[in-house]
């Protein structure tokens, strides 16, 4: 039979429900009566949505759990409420696109994951939206050297200096 569960220490308070000795149902964490985290448990495992708040009351992270593992879309925000990262999890491992954002909302980095390993084209962008770096991965291993570009899209050498058009054209 479900039993209310509460624990207070200083200005922090935890509240939820226990069922047969395991957390089960909604669970909340407060500090100085402000909500910090709300989550769901099922038979002692995190299961369902989780919301983590910054001390200023704005969301810090929106996560989803399944049987105790991150599963689904995860969103992370700055204290000002700006989306900083969006990624997908499958059974606790990164799986699918991962995007990091500049404060203006433009994509700063785009990576792809397959069962926790980088897989596919990985891109980093300049603030103006031009590609800054490009690299391909297969099962977590870089397939070739990283390609570098200036903020106008021109190829850069390993030293960060522009590469002549002829040299860039002759590269494999």
Image (cartoon, rainbow, N blue to C red):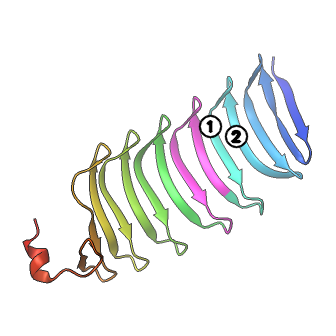
Left or right of 124? Residue 29 is right
- Residue displayed at 68% across by 25% down: 44
Q: Is residue 58 above or below residue 114?
A: below
Query: Which label belongs to residue 48?
Result: 1
| Front residue of 72 and 129 | 129
Between 156 and 43, the one lying in front of the other is: 156
Looking at the rendering, which quadrant does residue 157 occupy? bottom left
User: Residue 163: x percent and y percent?
Assistant: 19, 80
Verify CB contact (< 8 Å) between mark 2 and mark 1: yes
Judge from the rendering whether residue 58 lies leftward or rightward of residue 96; answer left or right: right
Residue 75 x/y as whole percent: 56, 54
Task: Please name whichever residue, 100 or 48, is drawn nearer the observer in this view of the structure.
Answer: 100
Secondary structure beneath dot 2 equals strand
- Tell me where residue 45 appears, x and y as whole percent: 64, 28
Q: Nearer the viewer, residue 103 or 48?
A: 103
- Give the labeled residue for mark 2: 39
| Residue 160 image label | none
Residue at horizontal 34 percent and vertical 76 percent from the top: 130
Query: Magenta residues, as a range?
Result: 60-80
Residue at (15% x, 83% y) in the render: 164
């Amino acid at each position: 039979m479900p039993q209310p569960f509460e624990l207070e220490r200083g200005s922090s308070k935890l509240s939820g429900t226990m069922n047969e000795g395991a957390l089960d149902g909604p669970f909340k964490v407060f500090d100085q009566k402000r909500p910090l985290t709300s989550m769901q448990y099922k038979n002692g495992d995190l299961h369902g949505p989780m919301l983590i708040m910054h001390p200023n009351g704005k969301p810090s992270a929106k996560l989803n759990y399944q049987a105790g593992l991150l599963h689904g879309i995860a969103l992370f925000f700055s204290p000002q409420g700006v989306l900083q990262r969006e990624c997908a999890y499958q059974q606790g491992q990164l799986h699918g696109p991962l995007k990091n954002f500049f404060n203006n909302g433009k994509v700063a980095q785009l990576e792809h994951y397959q069962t926790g390993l980088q897989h596919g084209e990985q891109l980093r962008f300049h603030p103006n939206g031009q590609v800054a770096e490009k690299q391909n991965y297969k099962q977590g291993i870089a397939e070739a050297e990283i390609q570098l570009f200036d903020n106008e899209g021109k190829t850069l050498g390993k030293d960060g200096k522009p590469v002549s058009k002829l040299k860039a054209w002759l590269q494999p």
